[in-house]
Image (spheres, rainbow, N blue to C red):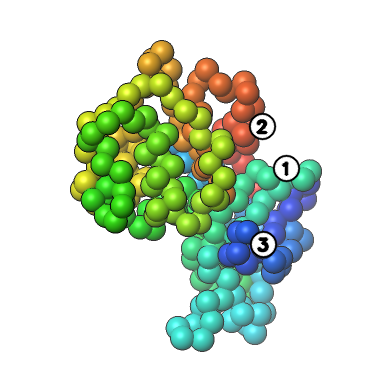
Amino acid sequence: MVLKTGLRVLLFDNDLASPTLLDDLTSRVEKLRFATALHGGFKYANFSLASSLPEAWEYLAEAGKTSGRHFSRLLISEEQRTIWEGRITDIRFAYSGGEIGLRFTAQGYWGSLRDQFYSDDDGSRTDWTSGSHTADDIIKEMLTAECPSINSDQSNIDANSRDIAGINLSARAYPQDIIITKLAPISDSDNSMWFFPFGKIASRIGKSVLSRHWIIVSALLIRRIWS
């Protein structure tokens, strides 16, 4: 059964600055599932798509010839509000009842924080073991250096006031792991907990500012399933 809701499901190319619409899949998508969480924001999405064999090959990657739709931007919206976005990471044949189809899997941009390692020993990175620093300073540097799929707009990354000078980030690690294991457990100076939702534009929000970010938070805390 195809979607019978106010949702739209669109595929764009991977140019985040000036995206080109590739496919409007709204009327053809089946078994759509997507989830959100804190930390991470948009986590995963998957769906099925009925397809002819020639069309299926257009979506699938072929070594040395075409990237198919892999790493295309998936956008799920409802009444012009984005409720999930990420990038296609897996496309495979789904054969059922004598009919050919495709099964898509996508990850939210939180997944791009595992594309490249970060170490403050690389290049001209900041030595966090000396001087005065806060968690948002570290996050902004990691995103700029190692996470090109995250928008350069860092205005939603709220500052905090706890000085974490002395933290050692010389060991190579994914930015996602650094956030979860080293930065997230550190509360602010007023003991408020901080969370890290990521869309194309990263955010860092504390419980004291949830009301100010109600649009972001309401989208990030939902989980919906259609089939």
Residue wearing tag 2 = 215
Q: Mark on residue 18? A: 3
Q: Mark on residue 81? A: 1
Q: Is residue 98 visible?
A: no
Residue sitting farthest toward the top? 190
SS at mark 2 in the image = helix
Residue at 50% in and 20% down: 207
| Among the two numbered marks 3 and 1 on one chain, the one whose residue lies closer to the N terminus | 3
Quadrant of residue 163 in the image? top left
Using residue 19 as the reference point, say whether residue 42 is left or right of it: left
Residue at 65% in and 48% down: 226
SS at mark 3 in the image = loop
Using residue 28 as the reference point, say whether residue 196 is left or right of it: left
| Camera-nearest residue between 23 and 193 | 193
Is the residue under label 2 in contact with that under label 1 (CB below 8 Å)? yes
Residue at 69% in and 66% down: 20
| Amino acid at pointer 1 | Arg
Q: Position of residue 125 (x, y in %)?
A: 31, 49
Of circles 3 and 1, the one toward us is 3
| Amino acid at pointer 2 | Ile
